[in-house]
């Protein structure tokens, strides 16, 4: 593995507007390509029409569509189609001391064979990460190993028939096999958050794994979506349970990924919306969660998965106040590959632990993920505009 570039030798105020550092890994031609991509994504009309066209083109197997996507949006947001293809991305990121989180993003497995194939793939990411500082975490979704219907039935307390009971035993076995491999290889692993109607089941599995494998060091991390109004209390209860059980609490904090769906389903079912009343409430709880985690360092290990500059600065200040070194292994920052390089590269340059979620999988199978990225970049207030502004700023700087 290539040695990373040295970080700043003395503490400094980080500027997330420093585009020279943010785009230090990009050539002029790569920057121009990014400019074209984000110029397109900055248009709601182009994103909507383009997404519709690509879905139709894939359905009818339109010539060259796969290669067009692979050379544009796939190349920007994904590391490759296989773990091996991600090696180049991993090496390029690590040149700048930015880690890789290999995220197998194939969705839609419905059979035992499909669930087992996903389990084996996650284990391969753990084996790839073992002993490799450039890959600090692995990650998986429980819905890659189990049907949503079964998880929901368990959460609702519905009686399972004999076949479903066997299926759920297999689910727990798959989760334990993955987490045991992570423990054996000393690789930290995230269990991703999902929709509220299955999240309690996921939480229970996550805490069972922490109680098994987190006594010596944080190995298993659960994900807390702070756009839920009950999540700060859930975090505090999880900490109480960890203290009582004598294990480290692994925490990945995010704002969340299912907001529109959650509100729509809650309204249709006539129940209380689990989502915060507004964005300031989410921002407040996210920062309060950061404060709580640092107050309970080192028994809480945290990864702040955020593209929000204010929250990133806030965690930096909390670490300084608590006397926690930037490179402390209990604290990481994370962003999605292809987004917010101004955060990732400036953080790593200043000596903080930072990693990128790097999705991978066959182009056709990863399309749902790519469509969400395109949609979110136009829907998130100013996200594509911020990326576009920074790219234009760096292009002007290089021209001058």
Image (tube, rainbow, N blue to C red):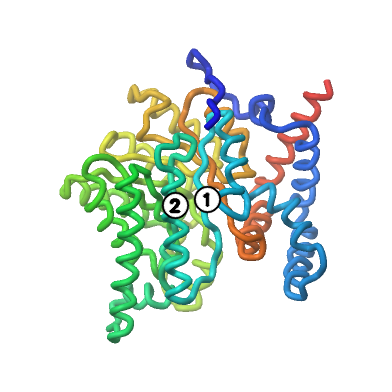
Q: Earlier in the sequence, mark 2 or mark 1?
A: 2
Residue bearing the label numbered 2: 139
Q: Secondary structure at mark 1?
A: helix
Name, please, the residue furthest toward the bottom: 161
Q: CA distance from mark 2 to mark 1?
A: 27 Å
**In the figure, residue 400 lies in which quadrant?**
top right
The residue positioned 30% from the left and 60% from the top of the image is: 176
The residue positioned 56% from the left and 42% from the top of the image is: 307
**In the figure, residue 367 lies in which quadrant?**
bottom right
Q: How many residues crowd mark 2 within 10 Å: few (<14), some (14–19), many (20+)?
A: many
Asked whether 376 or 188 is in front, the reply is 188
**In the figure, residue 363 lies in which quadrant?**
bottom right
Depicted 169 relative to depicted 360: above or below? below
The residue positioned 46% from the left and 32% from the top of the image is: 353
What is the x, y in percent for residue 144? 46, 65
What is the x, y in percent for residue 16? 60, 29
- Residue 143 visible in the current orientation: no
What is the x, y in percent for residue 47? 75, 59
Depicted 172 relative to depicted 89: above or below? below
Camera-near label (2 vs 1) is: 2
The residue positioned 46% from the left and 50% from the top of the image is: 125
- The mark found on residue 69 in the picture is none
Q: Left or right: where does residue 264 sit relative to residue 72?
A: left
Q: Left or right: where does residue 86 sit relative to residue 249?
A: right
Q: Secondary structure at mark 2?
A: strand
What is the x, y in percent for residue 266? 47, 72
Asked whether 6 or 196 is in front, the reply is 6
- Residue 199 visible in the current orientation: yes
Residue bearing the label numbered 1: 279
């Amino acid at each position: 593995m290539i040695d990373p570039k040295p970080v700043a030798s003395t503490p400094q105020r980080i500027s997330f507007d420093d585009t020279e550092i943010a785009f230090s890994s990009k050539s002029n031609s790569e920057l121009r390509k990014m400019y074209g991509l984000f110029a397109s994504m900055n248009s709601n009309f182009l994103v909507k029409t383009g997404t519709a066209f690509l879905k139709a083109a894939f359905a009818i197997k339109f010539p060259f569509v796969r290669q067009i996507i692979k050379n544009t949006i796939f190349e920007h947001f994904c590391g490759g189609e296989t773990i091996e293809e991600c090696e180049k991305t991993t090496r390029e990121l690590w040149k700048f001391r930015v880690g890789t989180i290999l995220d197998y993003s194939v969705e839609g497995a419905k059979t035992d064979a499909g669930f087992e194939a996903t389990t084996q793939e996650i284990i391969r990411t753990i084996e790839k990460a073992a002993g490799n500082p450039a890959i600090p975490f692995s990650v998986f979704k429980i819905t890659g190993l189990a049907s949503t219907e079964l998880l929901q039935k368990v959460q609702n307390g519905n009686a399972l028939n004999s076949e479903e009971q066997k299926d759920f035993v297999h689910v727990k076995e798959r989760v334990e096999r993955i987490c045991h491999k992570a423990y054996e290889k000393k690789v930290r692993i995230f269990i991703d958050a999902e929709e509220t109607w299955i999240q309690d089941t996921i939480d229970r599995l996550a805490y069972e794994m922490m109680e098994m494998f987190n006594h010596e060091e944080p190995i298993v991390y659960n994900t807390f979506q702070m756009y839920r109004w009950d999540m700060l209390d859930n975090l505090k209860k999880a900490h109480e349970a960890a203290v009582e059980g004598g294990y480290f609490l692994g925490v990945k904090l995010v704002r969340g990924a299912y907001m529109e769906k959650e509100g729509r389903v809650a309204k249709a079912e006539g129940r209380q919306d689990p989502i915060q009343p507004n964005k300031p409430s989410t921002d407040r709880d996210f920062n309060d969660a950061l404060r709580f985690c640092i107050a309970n360092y080192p028994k809480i290990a945290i990864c702040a998965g955020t593209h929000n500059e204010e929250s990133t600065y806030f965690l930096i200040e909390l670490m300084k106040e608590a006397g926690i070194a930037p490179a402390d292994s209990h604290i990481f920052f994370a962003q999605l590959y292809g987004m917010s390089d101004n955060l990732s590269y400036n953080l790593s340059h200043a000596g903080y632990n930072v990693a990128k979620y790097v999705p991978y999988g066959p182009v056709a199978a990863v399309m749902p993920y790519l469509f969400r990225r395109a949609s979110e970049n136009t829907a998130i207030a100013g996200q594509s505009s911020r990326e576009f502004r920074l790219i234009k700023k760096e292009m002007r700087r290089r021209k001058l």
